[in-house]
Amino acid sequence: METRAPLALIGLFVLAAIGAVFGFVYWLNTAGGLGKRTFYTIRFENTVSGLLKGAAVLFNGIRVGEVTELRLDPDNAKQVEATIAVVANTPVRADTRIGLDFQGLTGVPVVTLEGGTQKLPESSGSAPPLLLADPGAGVSMTLAARNALRSLERILGENADSLRDTINNINTFAAALARNSDKVDGILKGLERMTGGGPAGAASVIYDLTVPRSFPATDKPLPGSMVVPELTTILLYDTQKVLVRPSGGEDPSFENARWSDSLPKLLQARIVQSFENAKFLGTVTKPIDTLTPKYQLLIDLRRFQITAGDTPVAEIEFTAKIVGDDGAMAAAQHFHVKEPTRVTDAAAAAAALDKAFQKAATELVAWTSASL
């Protein structure tokens, strides 16, 4: 009896140990617990490379179960069905997105579940509810890259002639650029100067025009309001540069000499101020949206420059037309003023042009007053 008792205890201990091992294995197989599980069948339309029985199932990144079975669909060779067991309270819905992910350096595949709002329909019989995986689930990076390369190869093959023509055109264009590199450099430098780029040069010197203050005495007021629109001119004079024609001054100071505004705008402003200084302050103005003037003074600028030569002169030439509100021309006059000068630098040129402008503006105001 004494010998049999220890043997019986040993046998009970062995049986208990075996049961504990089986329980532990079962616990591992069910992802850490003996709780209630819900089973679902997932149908994949592509390969599930590397997916094994026991692979983890993640819902929004949290492990909730594992794959319990993998099988092929005998009626459709492209489809693979997997049965998963997840914690009973996992919120799996009819529109839950299902896919495969590869984790770790070795790329261990796991089933991923994400989101969803629609409730699953009641399953018929004992079959688990059927979930459909995303069409792209199971496509590995290698397979995706291979498919992309095949698509690219097909596109290149279909457009080989067009690509060949494009490359030939690029070669032709490059050869044309090489032949005209000097011209291209000049164009780029011009664009650079126009946009204010390039290395910083000397600061620009700004010049202005002086408004005359002395006019012939007159007590005759203008018979109505008059506006002076912006002067019309050719592109050459629509600039801020101090122009020297025909050979633009040798003195480098001319490159940095500028009027305070473009000539049409600057002359418009100074002519209006000339009329104001001649006591026509309430009569002559720039165009105003709310004002319907009786007259318009239309001025076309023909010259505003230093004319170089044996005897350089500051030259201003323009025509003036007075047009009534009925469209009829009341008067017209041609003005041409020359002021002798010695062109030594930009400051001397600007001073000569300023003096010529004062004469021309005085003549313009006197003529306008006498014509109306």
Image: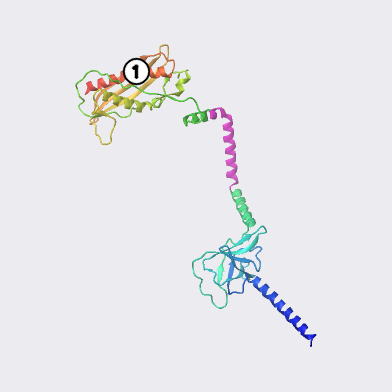
What residue span does the magenta drawing correspond to?
159-185
190 up-or-down from 356: above or below: below
Which image quarter is the C terminus in? Answer: top left
Q: Residue furthest top?
A: 310
Is 211 positioned to the left or the right of 84 in the image? left
Picture quadrant of residue 228: top left
Q: Is residue 295 left or right of residue 191?
A: left
Badge 1 element = helix
Q: In the rendered image, which quarter contains the N terminus?
A: bottom right
Please indicate, yes or no, whether residue 172 appears anywhere in the rendered image. Answer: yes
338 in relation to 146, above or below: above
The location of residue 343, given as percent across then percent down, is 42, 15
Name of the residue lying farthest toward the bottom: 1
**In-front residue for pair 177/246:** 246
Question: Horizontal placement of 15 versus 219: left or right?
Answer: right
Could you tell me which residue is drawn at 37 percent across and 21 percent down?
304
Q: Nearer the viewer, residue 190 or 361?
A: 361
Q: Residue at x 59, y 39 (%)?
A: 168
Q: Which residue is mark 1?
A: 356
| Three-letter code for the amino acid on which mark 1 is drawn | Ala
Q: Nearer the viewer, residue 110 or 177?
A: 110
Q: 23 above or below 182?
A: below
The image position of residue 118, as x and y in percent, is 49, 68
Answer above or below: position of 263 versus 81.
above
Q: Say whether residue 270 is magenta.
A: no
